[in-house]
Amino acid sequence: MPALVLIGAQWGDEGKGKATDQLGGLVDYVVKFNGGNNAGHTVVVGDETYALHLLPSGILSPGCIPVIGNGVVIDLAVLFQEIDGLEARGVDTSRLVVSADAHVIPSYNRVLDRVTERFLGSRKIGTTGRGIGPTYADKMNRVGIRVQDLFDEKILRQKVEGALTLKNHVLVKVYNRKAVTADSVVEELLGYVERLQPMVRDTGLLLSTALHEGRTVLLEGGQATLLDVDHGTYPFVTSSSATSGGACTGSGIPPNRIDKVIAVVKAYTTRVGEGPFPTELTGDGQDGVDGERLRTVGHEFGTTTGRPRRCGWYDAVIARYAARVNGVTDFVLTKLDVLTGWDTIPVCVAYEVDGKRFDEMPMTQTDFHHATPVYEYFAGWTEDISQARTFEDLPENAQRYIRALEQMSGAPFSSVGVGPDREQTLALRDLLR
Ligand code: GDP
Ligand code: IMO
Ligand code: MG
C-alpha cells in the first residue's frame, strides 16, 4: 500500500484532521501537499484537543514522519509558534521535515491579502487573511521566495528586492500603505534560518526513496475540492490545488504511485467565506432555524478565524463531483451524530436551474449561482449514536441515511464518524486493505 491521498470533498472542515490522525498511526509518512495556515484541523485525543494549521496532522502520531511538501506556503513565524505550542504540551515534533522548494509567506503578502479584500468590498472572497493568495500568485509569477533561498543571503536579498519593486508600487500607490523595506523582510527571514535549516530536505527524493523501500505515505490535503483553484467554485476558492492531482505536484510523488484516494465528507455541508452554496440554510424561517441548529450542535465555527460557518444539508451533486474529479476510492463520512434529533433530513440529489434539472455540477458559475436544490427526504432518528462502534449499533434510519448517501455519492463509504474523538468512528471497510 504505497501512497494514499486524503482530501476534503466539500468546502473544507469535513474532519480531515481527525481522519489523518487516525491513519497516522498506520503509515510511515504524512505529507501536507497544499495550502498553508489557512487550514485549521482540530484533532481530539481523549481529553486533549489540538488545533493544527501548518503542521501535518500526522505530527501527533509518534511513529510517523510529518512532511511539509513543496506545494505548501509557509508562514515561518506560525510554523515555529505551532511547533513550540506542541512541544510545550509534550508532543515530539523533532521528526518534522520541510521541503526546500516550499514557498514562504513574506510579511508583505499578509498585508496585501488583507488590503486587497478590503479594496474588493462586496466582491471580496472572504479569505483567511494569511497571505495565501498573494504568495501563490508570486509563485506562479516567478517572484516567490522559497525555503532554500533563505540559505543564500545574496540570492534572498535579490529576490526580496525584485518582488518589492512591484509590490511597493501597489502598496503605496493603490492601497495607500507604507512601503516595505527589503532589509526588514530579509532580516526577519534570516532570523529563522538557524532553526529551520536542520529540518529542510529534498522531500521529493526522500518520499520517492521511502516508497521504493515499501513505506506507506499519506498525502494530506488542506481545504477541499470546491475550494480548489481549478475545480472549485472559482473565484471563491483558495489559491492552491486541493484535489488529488495537487497531491502529486505538491509532493513530487508521481500519479502512478497513488493507490487510494480517500475523500472526507460531512453528513451535511458547511462553507466559510463568500461564494455560492446551493443547500445553505439561512433566513428567518425554518431554514434559518435548521442552519443555526447545525452550527450550534456541530460547533461550526472556524478553527482558524473563528468565523461562524455557513451550514446546509448534504449535497450529493457535490459528492459525485468530488468522486469524479479526485478519483475517490473511499469516502469517510463524518459528523453523522450532529444530525440526531431531526424528524426528516433533506438531501440534495440534483439542482434545478431556470426550470432545468442538473444531476451533475453545472458548467458555468452563473448556473451554479442560480442552482436550487432538488431534495429527497429521509426519516431521522432520536437515539444518541455517539457511543455506536459498529454499523449495526446505529438506529435503522441512520443506517438507511448512510446507505442512501453512499448510493448517491459515487464511491463506497469506509467509515462513519459519530463524534470528534479518535474512538468515535465506525469502520465499514478496512481503509488500508
Ligand atoms: P478539517 O479542516 O477538515 O480537518 O476539519 P476541522 O477540524 O476544521 O473541523 C471538523 C470539526 O469536527 C473538528 O472540530 C473535529 O473535532 C470535529 N469532528 C470530526 N469528526 C467528527 C464527528 O464524526 N462528529 C463530531 N461531532 N465532530 C467531529
Ligand atoms: P481546512 O483545511 C474552510 C476558504 C476561506 C475563503 C477561501 C480563500 O481547515 O478545511 P484563503 O485564505 O485560502 O485565500 O481563503 O478559502 N478557506 C477555507 N475554508 N476550511 C479551510 O481549510 C479553508 N482554507 C481556506 O474561508 O473562503
Ligand atoms: Mg478546518
Image: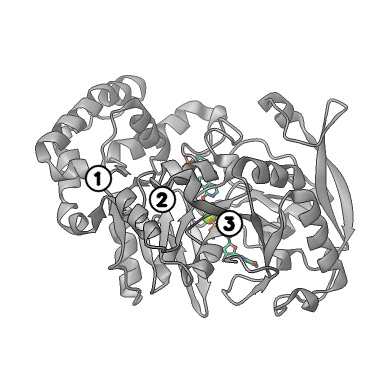
Would you say residue 37 is visible in this rendering?
A: yes
x and y, in percent, of residue 167 in the image? 29, 26
Left or right, 161 with respect to 432, comes to left
Rounded to the nearest angstrom, the CA distance separating label 1 from label 2 is: 16 Å
Helix, strand or loop for disc 1 = helix
Query: Of helix, strand and loop, which one carries label 3?
Result: loop
Residue beneath disc 2: 37
Q: Which mark is residue 301?
A: 3
Between tags 1 and 2, which lies in front?
Answer: 1
- Which numbered tag is attached to residue 147? 1
Mark 2 surroundings: few (<14), some (14-19) or many (≥20) residues within 10 A:
many
Which of pointers 1 and 2 lies earlier in the amino acid sequence?
Answer: 2
**Quarter location, residue 390:** bottom right
- Quadrant of the snapshot with the C terminus: bottom right
Residue 80: mark in rendering: none
Residue type (three-letter) at the residue carrying disc 1: Val
In the image, is the residue at mark 1 within 8 Å of ligand 2 by its beta carbon?
no
Q: What percent of the width, then of the height, locates residue 180? A: 22, 32
Residue at left offset 32%, top offset 73%: 92
Gap in Å between the C-alphas at discs 3 and 2? 16 Å
Q: In this view of the protein, which residue sits in the foreground, 275 or 140?
A: 140
